[in-house]
Amino acid sequence: MSAPAVIETHALTKVFGQQRALDSVDLRVVPGAIGLLGPNGAGKSTFMKCLLQLQPITSGSAKLLGREVGTEGREIRKRVGYTPEQDCHIPGMVGCEYVTYCAQLCGLPFQVARQRAHEMFDFVGMGQERYRKVDTYSTGMKQRLKLAQAIVHDPEIIFLDEPTNGLDPKGQEQILDLVQRLWVTYGMTVVLSSHLLRDVDRICEQIIIIARGRVLVHDSLENLKARRLGAAEVVLAGGHHELQTACAARGWTCEPLPNGHVKVEHKADSLNPLLKLLHGLQLAPLEVIPSPNALEEAFVQALELSNGGS
Amino acid sequence: MAVHDTNYQHWKGVHIGLWRRRLVIASNGVTRCLQVKGMRHIVTMCWMAALAMTAILFFVGQLLVPDGLIVQWMGNLNPQLQMFARLLTTWLEQHPETSVGATQNVLFYYFCTLLMPLNIFSLGVVVPLLITRDLASNAIIIYSSKAVSPADYLLGKFATAFGLLTLTWLGPVCAAWFLGNLLAPDWRFFWHSRAVLGHALIFCISSMGLLSLLALGVSAVSSKEKTTPAFWFMWWIVGGVVAPIARQTQPWLQHMSFSFDLQQIAITSFHIGSDIKTAQDNIPILGDMLREIPPRTIAVLSSPAIKGALVALLLMLVAVALVIRKRVKPE
């Protein structure tokens, strides 16, 4: 945690009438791929909007990229990208013009903006569609366009609000792949807000779970999974019965899953006892998935804690 | 697995300044507005009017000098007409401030106020493109997430409306003044009509600023693209109907009409009442013609209700500010 923080908040609070959308949020987030998880209405979008100054903060303070959100909004937004959840294109504009315009609004000279707009269309995998009016785009194209406009000015951090909404599985996979590359290959900090655990599990290293406007969990995905060590999902070609018998003899729970895998709760800190057992039974697993559903369980646990505490 | 082979490139260049970014909003807005066919027609009409005004100025200019083309043509047609024209031009030569200054002042007053309804109409055509469409399409969120503040956005939108009016109002007026005097038989016409240009600039720029702000406010009233032009035209038409009726009963009600208020600014800027009086008293023939104007009209032109107009416009601007403050935000 010695890296400089990209997001820092102190008692960040946002109130809408009687409702506290954010309740004294204290966070220090370092660069990386950050997953912002929470049920609908948890305060994820409000948190991002407060950081981007799209919503005024009621009380507390926030820093983004080391700058004070309340006073340096324009400078901050020069270095930040944002893809909102809803459609928000300028009607009547051609895709290429739109992304060029967005780049110019972020301070890029026209020639550079035009060139980068084309590069971004190439990056997000849009070909001739860039010359069509944005009004005619499909949902998938609009999601790509949103991503292109958000990264065209080469931001240091990008906020993605439900970027896979309305996409088919293939489209989701492609968008997530692009987002993952932004951090892994190009070092752009990514804050992914989603209620889809699979998306977050797929690309994020740090997890922030928000519910009822409060941060319930802020930890690395690795640590969250470590909390759930002692369980594994084994993919076998055969020998399920032998494994179940052997597990029962050791007092482990072994449960066949509908997808044909076997879930084993071996209660150990590492996979070694399970691997030894499989070796002893001369079973060659096709795959062993440690701590399956760790994120989901952490998410549910956090929510239960939040509900119990309220 | 990477979906595409194209690599992302970082950019470490120098950002353009804030005013350039505001200008980007304005130029993009003007481009969008000019994509509306009706708007292009209005621009063409305004520039045609400017050419017509240039022709009138050329004609008047030729009348004001003894060896002008018109006088020569009249001489060829009828020697008596030429004699009369020579008499007129001799007198006008002796009073250039009146002959050139007052004549052009009256002409430009009518030209500027003639273009006003056309410009109000043009704003009605583009009013949904200013803010309404951004509210409807949530594009306001995109602006708010970029390196511009809400004030920058509004400045850009104001400049859009102002820029359009420059194309359809200030531009034609200035062009007509310049071309009209360029085609005049004497360079001194520029000098004698300098005050006219000043009057036209004061009126046009102040009216354009006020109309642009009012249009911004109306554009922010609703996110429905049919509502805002309807609101604009209703306000204009109702004001236009109410003003003449209110003159007889409750004169303060006239100020509900922004076009009436702008008319008062025009009368004040051009000092039109005093120019008509000067012409009546000093210019032969034209003075006799101007004496036909009813005294009541002369009284209206001599003492415009400028204070009431300014107060009414100020109140309208306050209402605009409140609407914009309430409506122009991301959520």
Image: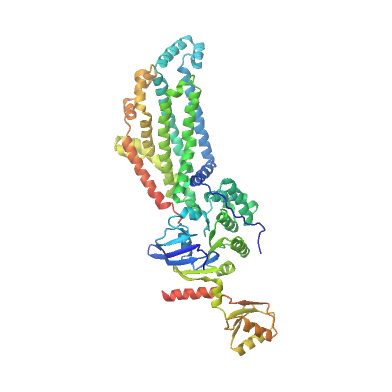
- A128 or A112, which is in the foreground? A112
- Left or right: residue A303 versus residue B238 is right
Q: Position of residue B131 (x, y in %)?
A: 47, 48
| Residue B227 visible, this orientation | no
Q: In the rendered image, which quarter contains the C terminus of chain B?
A: bottom left
Q: Position of residue B129 (x, y in %)?
A: 49, 46
Identify the image quadrant of residue B83: top left
- Left or right: residue A49 versus residue A186 is left
- A271 or A299, which is in the foreground? A271
Residue in view at x 35 percent, y 38 percent: B242
Residue A141, compared with residue B55, is above or below; it is: below
Total numbered circles: 0
| Residue B53 visible, this orientation | yes
Q: Position of residue B299 (x, y in %)?
A: 31, 28
- B244 or B273, which is in the foreground? B273
Residue B63, compared with residue A167, is above or below; it is: above
Q: Position of residue B43 (x, y in %)?
A: 51, 36
Q: Residue furthest top?
A: B79
Identify the image quadrant of residue B207: top left
Residue in view at x 34 percent, y 28 percent: B297
Colour logic: rainbow
Q: Residue furthest left?
A: B249
Q: Residue furthest bottom?
A: A249
- B230 or B89, which is in the foreground? B89
